[in-house]
Every structure is written in structure tokens, then in C-alpha cells.
Image (spheres, rainbow, N blue to C red):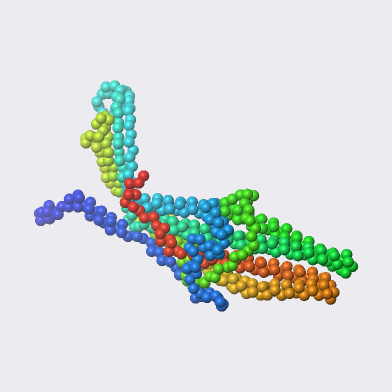
Amino acid sequence: MTSRVNASHRPHRPPLVRVSLLFAGVLLLAGCTVGPNYKRPAAAVPAKWEIVEPWREAVPKDAIPKTSWWTVFHDDDLNTLENELLAANQTLKVAFAHYDQARASAAVQNAQLFPTLSVDPAAERQRYSGTRPSGSYVPLTGPVTQSNYVLPFTVSYEVDLVGKRRRTIEAAQASYQANAADLESVRLVLTAELAADYFTLRQLDTQIALLHRTVETLQKGLDLVNSRHNGGVASGLDVTQEETLLNTTRTQAILLRQERKQFEDAIAVLTGKPAPDFHVAERPLAAEPPNFETSLPSELLERRPDIAESERQMAIANAQIGIAKAAYYPSLVLYGQGGWNSAEISQLLNAASAFWAVGANLAQDIFTGGARRAQMQFSQAGYDASVATYRGTVLNAFREVQDNITGLQVLDAARQSQTDAVDSSRRQLEIATSRYTGGLVSYLDVVSAQQNLLNNEQEATIIQGQRLVTSVLLVKALGGGWDAASLAAVQLKPQPRDAFAP
């Protein structure tokens, strides 16, 4: 008796309270996010670069423009070509398209934060047979024709119980940023390739001009030797030696023109122009490598877009672990349906024609044959691979910077010694010519001195071109003035108005 009285007086919770408690529990569970939170793994970083005087460590990004780094060379022709590349290069357009795709993909994932609303109106008029089977005992009175008008609305929403959607959005945002870094990396590689090709082209222009001047000088020397030979002073051997050097020099100039055309055509492709219609006017090499001060190695991690892209790939792989782990938990979908249904279109929107339904669907896989475990292992292995790729990218970046620092130091020393070699070879030619005119030596000494001067002048030109190309490669290795902080602006945050977007 007592138990029945207690049971009859048990507190009764209204349906609204029970529903509220249920949703409170759902929201509490939805605040959880499974999977590891991302933290950038450490990479081996040297304490400093191997640098000799007069080089020193500083902050080169202060001297390199963030967008148009090539302007540090103060070459108007180069600036024009780089701008044409940015406007028309097809590889860069592909990178831009991939960037736009990544942004759209992030928007798709953000859309999962909002419920979906759909409408499926239908109108039907149907005639039923008068002799159709009937499940009732009421006799059929003949054929029946009737109409059916439906205006239903359906809303559904999957509750993010354990953060699967949040991890998916996290991965999409990281992918968006990785594509932004890739775009900057492609831009840097292409503009650096153009600058290197351009300075090599100017080096060839200088060599060709040098060979032409040498041909003119040798032609004058040949005229002198012919005159002396006709006067019986010089031998036929002197004439043939000078002719041989003259023709060899002409051949070198012809072959260099072919090499020049190849670089000109490469620049045409980079700037988005057909090679047969593209020409760069000849101009001697006049630029000088800018004075760069190298930064600390640790700063390189924030200044190379390829390192930033690799780091973002780790963030994607880390989020994939959380997505895989979420498969161990149930999914909850809330849905509601409502609308109007009537046999008469004139009564479709009446209150009596309205219908509705609400519900929830909780689904959980019990046995999957080890698929979830395998997916977790797959995601973890993918993350491990991304970490190794990141660290390899960092090591390669250090190598590139150090190689180009060393290269510039060596080329700078070589330029100074080669300048002395050119001066010495000029004096040698003057002495040999004077001694030949005085009858003290044969013309072979003059020819040898002429060849020696030409070789040293060409070597000096090649060294100057290599210094400029190596400077370009150093700027590229340092990130071209780019900074990973730029990625902070690459965010696609959901807005309330997106809930009403089609």
C-alpha cells in the first residue's frame, strides 16, 4: 500500500522538461572534440649560418620587398617582365585556381554548421479503377478521380557530438592556408626562374658584345699582319694564326646566339607569350647583386612559403586523426517536417490541411571488421609522414640558403681575382704587341696574348652573371620577403547570414 502511494506521488516531469534535459545532455556531449589538438612538431635548426667577413647576420626581410622582391636589382626591363609574368603565366593561373578551389572547399565544410532546409512541392490528379480490389466491406461505387496537393518543408541537422565536424572544418581551413602558401611558393619559384633566366640572357648579351669587339680588334690585327706580310716583314704563319683566332671567335659568337635564343624563348613561356613573337632587345649586363644580410636560421621557418605549406599539411593530417577517431562514437541527426496537404488546392493553406513531424535518429556502428581501427592507423601514419616531410623541407631550406651564401662569397672572391687577371692579360697583350712590332718575338706571342685576354674577359662576364643568378637564388631561398604571418588573414569564418545562403 505504501509503495503504491509513493508511486502515485512520484514527481512528474512535463514533456517539455524531459526534452530540455535531453537536449542539455546532447549539447554537453557536443562540446567534446576527440583527437589530438595540433601542435607544430620541432625541427632541427642550426644556431647560425657559416659566414665569413664581410657578411653578417641580420634581418634581410627588411631589405626585400614582400611582393616585388625583384625590384632590389633596380632593372626596369626585369620589372616589366616580372609584371607580365604575374599577369599571364599559366602555371600561376593553375595555382590561383587551386587556391580558389580550396576556399570553396572550406566554405562547403563551414556550411555543415547550419541546418539544411528543403521543400518538395507536388501536385497530382489520379483516377482509381471502379473494379479495383477493396480491403473493406463497403462496395465500390465505381471509378474515383481525385487530386492531391502537397507543400512539404523538411529541416535536418546533424549534431556534432564529438567534434567530427569541427575537425573536418579544421582540416579544410588548414588546406585553404596550405594552398595559399603553395600559391606564394609557385609565385616565388616562377619569378625567381624568370630573374635567373633574364640575368643569364644579359650575361650572354655581354659575351656576344665582347666577342664582336674582339672580332673587330682581330680584324684590324689581321689587316696589319697582311700588310707586313705583303711587305716581306711577316711570315704566312703569322697571317694564318691571326685568321684562325678571328674565325674561332666568330664561331663562338654564332653559337652563343643560339644559346641566347633558348633563354629568350624560356622567358616568353614564363610571361605567357608565343616564343616566335617574343624578343628581348640586347643589352649588356649592368646590374650588381644587392647587399643582403642573412637572418638567423630559426627565422627561415617563418619566411619560406614551402615550409609554411608543409606545416599546414601536418595540421590537416592531425585533424584527420580526430575525424577517424570520431567514427567510434554515434551520430545524431535531428529532423523536422511540416507543410500542407489537401485534395483541393483552394484549401491547401488552411489550418486543417497542415501536418508536421519531429524526430531524432541516433546511429552507431557496432562491428566494422576492424575498418575503424585501420582508418585510425592510416591517419596516424599519414601524420607521421607529414612530420617527416616537414622536417625534410626545413633541412633542404637550410641547405639552399647555406649553398647560396657560400656561392656568393666564393664568386665575390673570384670576381676580384678575375678582375686582376683581366688587367694582367691586357698588359701582356700590350707588351707582346710592342715586342712583336720591335721584332723581338714572333706573332705567336701576340696571338697567345689575344686569346688569353679574350678568355679572361669572358670568364669575368660569366662570373658576374653567376653572381646575379646566385643572388636571385638566395632571395628565393630566403622566401622572397614573404612571411608566414600572412596566412593568418587566410581564414573563412562562417557568418550567420550563411544559414540563409542557397
> Can residue 499 be seen from the camera position used here?
yes
Q: State the image coordinates of residue 54 (x, y, percent, origin top left).
A: 56, 77
Residue at image point 60% right, 56% down? 267
Q: Is residue 122 above or below residue 445?
A: above
Out of 375 and 150, give the one closest to the viewer.
150
Q: Is residue 143 left or right of residue 414?
A: left
Out of 271 and 493, give the one closest to the viewer.
271
Residue projecting furthest to the bottom: 53
Residue at image point 40% right, 50% down? 108
Residue at image point 27% right, 30% down? 345
Out of 417 and 323, give the one closest to the viewer.
417
Q: State the image coordinates of residue 228 (x, y, percent, origin top left).
A: 86, 67
Q: State the image coordinates of residue 276 (x, y, percent, origin top left).
A: 64, 49
Q: Quadrant of the C terminus?
A: top left
Q: Is residue 336 above or below residue 462?
A: above
Q: Quadrant of residue 137?
A: top left
Residue projecting furthest to the right: 232
Q: Is residue 425 left or right of residue 156?
A: right
Q: Quadrant of the N terminus?
A: bottom left
> Can residue 363 be seen from the camera position used here?
no
Q: Quadrant of residue 5?
A: bottom left
Q: State the image coordinates of residue 98 (x, y, percent, origin top left).
A: 48, 53
Residue projecting furthest to the top: 142
Q: Is residue 456 left or right of residue 108?
A: right
Out of 499 and 74, give the one closest to the viewer.
74
Q: How many marks?
A: 0
Q: Is residue 493 above or below residue 225?
A: above
Residue at image point 47% right, 57% down? 179
Q: Is residue 374 above or below residue 498?
A: below
